[in-house]
Image (cartoon, grey):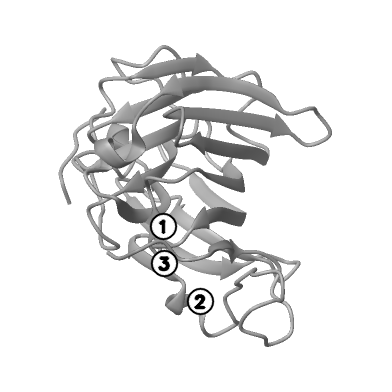
């Protein structure tokens, strides 16, 4: 079912960049450094490509809808603030991959040096195939030829989802119900850890992989964000409550 196409600065003070959370009263930045997009100003914080859009749920929480349930879609969303990829960082988010049975194809969190307009292939490309200067953590819900299952995580280098640098079966369902993820990069140890948890369950470490993030992204500073795709099987693929704790560049 899968075919894909390729559709500087110095270190600033560490800041907590909260891209998507419940929208509060109009204030540009909280005292603790948390930055939140305003009702009409999220475009200043997020670069959207392909089918990606920002919507609101019933609780007035802003959600990145990477795909909307149609066929052969690809979407990406990047923080417009570049982060220092030579430094340690942590990101957390909630994902809800839903509608369609089975659903496809999944989402990926990326750190990349290609730019805020980066968007890769649909279907098994998960929206990042062809983004060569990148490190992807994928949450894959469809078993393509090179995949171990329809419910796995992987670390992928060089924008090629057919080659996995690290693999893990997910201990929780990635499709159907929201799940929480935490990705932590230790720059000193060149180590990437990925944790997941379902609502009401303890967090579990699923991936622990050695990688030089800046080298693999081909840049000392770059963009972080998400991609997702559908093919001949579809899903709505949403991300919300996204935070990034990283030195800005």
Residue 81 has which mark?
3
Q: Are marks 3 and 1 in contact (CB under 8 Å)?
A: yes
Q: Determine the secondary structure under disc 3.
A: loop
From the viewer's perspective, is residue 136 above or below residue 153?
Answer: below
Q: Residue 233 location in percent, x, y?
A: 39, 35
Q: Is residue 245 left or right of residue 84?
A: right
Q: Nearer the viewer, mark 1 or mark 2?
A: 1
From the viewer's perspective, is residue 8 above or below residue 155?
Answer: below
Q: In which quadrant is the C terminus drawn?
A: bottom left
In depth, the one of 2 and 111 nearer the eye is: 111
Q: Residue 150 location in percent, x, y?
A: 47, 20
Q: Residue 185 location in percent, x, y?
A: 50, 36
Local crowd size for mark 1, using a 10 Å CA cut-off: few (<14), some (14–19), many (≥20): many
Q: For residue 198, what is the image quadrant?
A: top right
Q: Determine the secondary structure under disc 2.
A: helix
Q: Is residue 86 left or right of residue 185?
A: left
In depth, the one of 223 and 186 nearer the eye is: 186
Compare marks 1 and 2 and give the one earlier in the sequence.
2
Give the alpha-carbon distance from disc 2 to disc 3, as whole Å: 12 Å
Residue at which label 2 appears: 42
């Amino acid at each position: 079912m899968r075919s894909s196409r390729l559709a500087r600065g110095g270190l600033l003070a560490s800041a907590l960049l909260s891209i998507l959370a419940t929208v509060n009263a109009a204030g540009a930045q909280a005292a603790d450094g948390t930055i939140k997009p305003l009702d009409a100003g999220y475009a200043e914080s997020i670069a959207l490509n392909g089918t990606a859009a920002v919507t609101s749920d019933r609780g007035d929480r802003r959600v990145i809808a990477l795909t909307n349930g149609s066929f052969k879609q690809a979407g990406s969303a990047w923080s417009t603030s570049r982060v220092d990829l030579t430094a340690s960082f942590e990101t957390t988010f909630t994902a809800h991959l839903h509608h369609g049975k089975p659903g496809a194809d999944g989402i990926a969190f990326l750190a990349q040096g290609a730019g805020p307009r980066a968007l890769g292939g649909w279907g098994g490309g998960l929206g990042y195939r062809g983004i060569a200067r990148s490190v992807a953590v994928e949450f894959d819900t469809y078993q393509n030829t090179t995949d171990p299952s329809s419910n796995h995580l992987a670390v992928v280098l060089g924008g090629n989802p057919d080659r996995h640098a690290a693999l893990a079966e997910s201990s929780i369902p990635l499709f159907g119900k929201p799940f929480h993820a935490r990705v932590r990069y230790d720059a000193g140890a060149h180590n990437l850890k990925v944790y997941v948890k379902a609502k009401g369950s303890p967090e579990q470490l699923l991936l622990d992989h050695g990688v030089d993030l800046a080298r693999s992204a081909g840049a000392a500073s770059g963009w972080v964000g998400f991609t997702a795709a559908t093919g001949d099987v579809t899903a709505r693929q949403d991300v919300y409550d996204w935070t990034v704790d990283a030195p800005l560049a």
